[in-house]
Image (cartoon, helix red, strand yellow):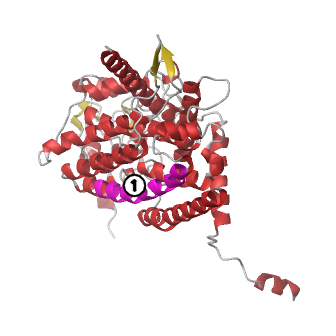
Amino acid sequence: MDYIIGLIVLFIKIAVMLGALLLAASYLVWLERKLLGRLQIRLGPNRAGIFGLLQPIADAVKLLTKEDIVPSDADATIFKLAPAVVAVTALMMFAVVPIGPDITVFGHTVPLVIADLNVGLLYVFALSSVGVYGVALGGWASNSKFALLGGIRGAAQMISYELSIGLSLVPVVMLSGSFSLTEIVDAQAGLPYILIQPVSFAIFVISAMAESKRIPFDLPEAENELGAGFHTEYSGMRFGLFFLGEYVHVQVLGALIAVFFLGGWHGPILPPVVWLLIKIFLVAVLMIWIRGTLPRLRYDQLMALGWKVLIPASLINIVLTGAFILMAA
Amino acid sequence: MQDGNKTNKPIAPPEDNSGWTALKALVDGFSTTLRHLGRKPITEQYPEFKRTLPERSRARIVLTRDPDGRERCVACYLCSAVCPVSCISMQSVEAADGRRFARWFRINFGRCIYCGLCAEACPTSAIQLTPDFENVQRDILTLVFEKEDLLVDHCGKDPDYDFYAHAGVKTDDADKGQHAKETLPVNVRSNMP
């Protein structure tokens, strides 16, 4: 009986989480277009519904009704699979993000996280690495030079930044003593890690933005050079899945920054879920602001930043944090 | 002497790559975009707000008339010859009064690229481009404009020009030598050296 109730609760949690994520992703697109428009003294979408609020729905209808084209020389199976890889890995990362403390419903204790893995942090890294396959294989299977170039760039960029993103979180793990996201959040009940580890925070934000292929790190797409990069040959909902994956990734990023550095759902007065949402929203706005301000890096600058600045800085940060912990102990 | 010293002092290198300049550049950029966030968008919303286009912007083609209201077009075929997409066609005839005109004149706007070469080629200022660009149709065949669709009741951009007042062509209005700035034709037989 307990097993069945647990299963039902799990499915409800997954359904709510997926629904919220997809809805938020579509309105994140709206927010991005609107805010980016205002940053560039434009209006942004304002035709579909009041303030263009129905624009995401119109976009979804358009993408769903468009022809799904597979280029004749493409590797059809991989070509069709690649967008799903990107979208699914981005969605699955949310399974380990705690959105609040345990709550009690009808005498049962329900943790507000889909899966409290004790290696949650490694799970997140594993999924974001698998996500690279979506980009690289999608670009390769398209059998187009622009898509291939985009895919190669994507693979190289994301592997480079995977290193610094991992190293930047080592101090967080050292401080909290756990790989579980729930326990990392619990460890920040008093003081969020952004105050203790500002360098880690900066490295994590920069590498995570590179990981999610956003301006100024959008070299795999690079419209001006590569058409649309790895998704040049995609149309209809398959392109939509890449798009969805990107915006779910922005939310994942917001959630991870919140969990690792901003204290997760901890916060005064307001309910925990609201605090987490506020933090995710702030990170999203920050990323849109960055997109509206900074130009794209050159490829060598991108690599130099990753290998020559971020990785040494995070290594030094780890050593200093270790020394500090040893001295405190 | 002192002035000379001043101008000769070493100038800072043009590209200062210190972290401080980089930080200043970042702050500058982010504050610029943030300032723009508070500004009123400069967008002009098209169907509600229509900007008056410059007189010389190139869109729908018209056939204009003389100051006295007669057709300017003399059906010389120059516009149809110069048209890069061959969208102009006509049939020329000569009227009883000696003036040439087009029996029919057709422009296929489905093909027209609004390059304006026809208006440039026209010797009589008959064919002209107007700023009216809103001529979209559902059916492409409705974009084929006949002479009666093209003719307008004004002189367009060239209000005073009257080709037959200068042309030297004999019509019912004026014989040879009677046009503006024209002298009587010389009898070539009386003109021997």
Residue A219 percent across, percent down from the top left: 39, 55
Which amino acid, mark 1? Leu
**What residue lies at 29% left-to-right and 45% top-to-bottom?**
A231
Residue A83 percent across, percent down from the top left: 27, 40
Is A293 drawn above or below residue B144 in the view shown?
Answer: below
Q: Along the line of sight, which residue is nearer the eye, B138 or A309?
A: A309
Specify the segment rendered in magenta. A151-174
Q: Along the line of sight, which residue is nearer the eye, B152 or A326?
A: A326
Residue A154 percent across, percent down from the top left: 34, 54
**What residue lies at 32% left-to-right and 51% top-to-bottom?**
A229
* B70 on left or right of A72: right
* B131 on left or right of B30: left
**Image quadrant where residue B33 sits:** top right
Residue B128 percent across, percent down from the top left: 40, 37
Per the image, the residue denoted by label 1 is A219
How many numbered marks have been drawn onto this rendered protein structure?
1
Q: Is residue A104 magenta?
A: no
